[in-house]
Image (cartoon, helix red, strand yellow):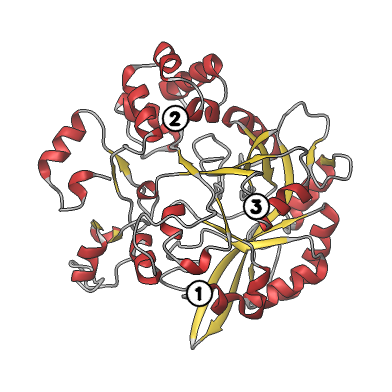
Amino acid sequence: MRIYADLHIHSYYSGATSRNMNLEEITRYAAIKGLGLLGTGDALHPGWFKELNERLEEIDDTGIYRVKSSESSAYFIFQTEVATVHQYREKFRRIHHVILMPSKDVSAQLADRLSTYGDLASDGRPVLTITPAELVDIILETEKRCLIFPAHAWTPWWSVFGSFSGVDSLEEAYEDRVKDIHALETGLSSDPPMNWRVSSLDRLTLVSASDAHSPYPFRLGREAVAFELDRLTYEEVTDAIRKKDRNRIIMTVEVPPAYGKYHWSGHRNCNVGPLSPEEAKSIGYKCSVCGKKLTKGVDDRVNELADRPPNYIPEGSIGFKYAIPLQELIAVSEGVSLESEHKLMSGKIWKEYARIISALGDEFRIMFEVSEEELRNAMTPQLVNLIMAVRQNKIKIIPGFDGVYGRIIFGTEEKMEERKHISKRLEDFF
């Protein structure tokens, strides 16, 4: 049974999250996307937990839940993201972690224990004054079947390897409990090849998830894990991750890292960026306009910690495929700006998206399985060319920086940008 899983999302109880991030909308759009399994998000928050407790039912003691009286094919695992704040070597470290739990009862027990370290009702993603090692202690003492791993591991802020508040190794974060960390979430601005450059990460299973703050298909499932399972249970999913089982984990779905918001360095407020690692280093990571520190790109941070060259593939690694949300590709093919999410969910973009889904099936099927001939029979040549470019890793992107998403260059704009020769690395646009 092939199943696409997005194991890190949020609810409307998290800050900067859509009010539509509720069970109805999540399950509705999960089916359109092709997702079969989701994290619940925010399972420690008392308000969200109350809704989950009342509206989800477990399937045959599997640790897998579904919405009661629903015909949706989307299932859930209890999941949350938490932040820890602690001091290490005279500097405060701010790290985010994903926690998967085998049941709603465990979620309730864990909430009770962690409430001592922070206000769980303040936000769906609570901030805990505790070390990562202590967090692991509490989680596994509560229930040893729980699974914890670093969230969006390379993002400049709030991540284990973040340039602003992270550390240089997992051992520095999790100390003697590092042996209980079995996975790492790549995040939007890194992909497996970037993580493969750090040999100390080889034993970990690289997982991908959306960290979605809205339920729409251009957010939900934009990154995911593809499992091949005989039976869908919590134990099967987490055991496959713990064991880095290539028979049960087929691949991860990854956004091209240049498309993420922090791939290269820059300073958005001064419109400085994106700067390649070479360019940023040459100016000492200082903004050329205001003199303040640049937000260091994930590509730069990987270079700092890497002990292997680019393009190294370690033995036993799990494969991946790139994907960019279909709605965004439609918008690019139509010459529509991506600055407003509203444009993607209304008017001609949504109408065309719905038509294509109706004709060809869910989005993952369209992005990975539908033949080029079938695509050309159902959509414009421009859109087919974009999808094929993503499949072949030939999509051209100006890298994201300092909270600004990367930008796809296509058609007439591509020719104009190529003539500009923005920089020695940008001229190829990846």
Give, as a three-letter code, the residue at label 1. Ser
Q: Nearer the viewer, residue 39 or 304?
A: 304
* Type of the residue with mark 2: Gln
N-terminal-most mark, 2 or 3: 3
The foreground one among 317 and 192 is: 317
Q: Amino acid at mark 3?
A: Tyr
150 sits left or right of 112 in the view: left
Q: Residue at x 70, y 53 (%)?
A: 79
Q: Which residue is mark 2?
A: 327
Q: Which mark is residue 224?
A: none
197 relative to 232 in the view: left or right: left
Distance of mark 2 from mark 3, alpha carbons? Answer: 26 Å
Which residue is depicted at the point 31% across and 58% down?
Answer: 264
Q: CA distance from mark 2 to mark 1?
A: 37 Å
Q: For marks 1 and 3, give the one nearer the viewer.
A: 1
**SS class, disc 3:** loop
Quadrant (top left, top right, bottom left, bottom right) of the N terminus: top right
Give the SS element for disc 1.
loop
* Local secondary structure at mark 2: helix
Residue 136 image point, x, y percent: 70, 71
Q: Position of residue 4 (x, y in %)?
A: 62, 38
From mark 1 to mark 3, how far is it between C-alphas? Answer: 32 Å
Q: Residue at x 45, y 19 (%)?
A: 352
Tag shown at residue 13? 3
Q: Residue at x 43, y 37 (%)?
A: 324
Crowding at mark 2 (Cα within 10 Å: few <14, some 14-19, many 20+): many
Q: Quadrant of the C terminus?
A: top left
Q: Which residue is mark 1?
A: 169
Left or right of residue 278, residue 315 in this image: right
Q: Are marks 1 and 3 in contact (CB under 8 Å)?
A: no
Q: Is residue 358 above or below residue 46?
A: above
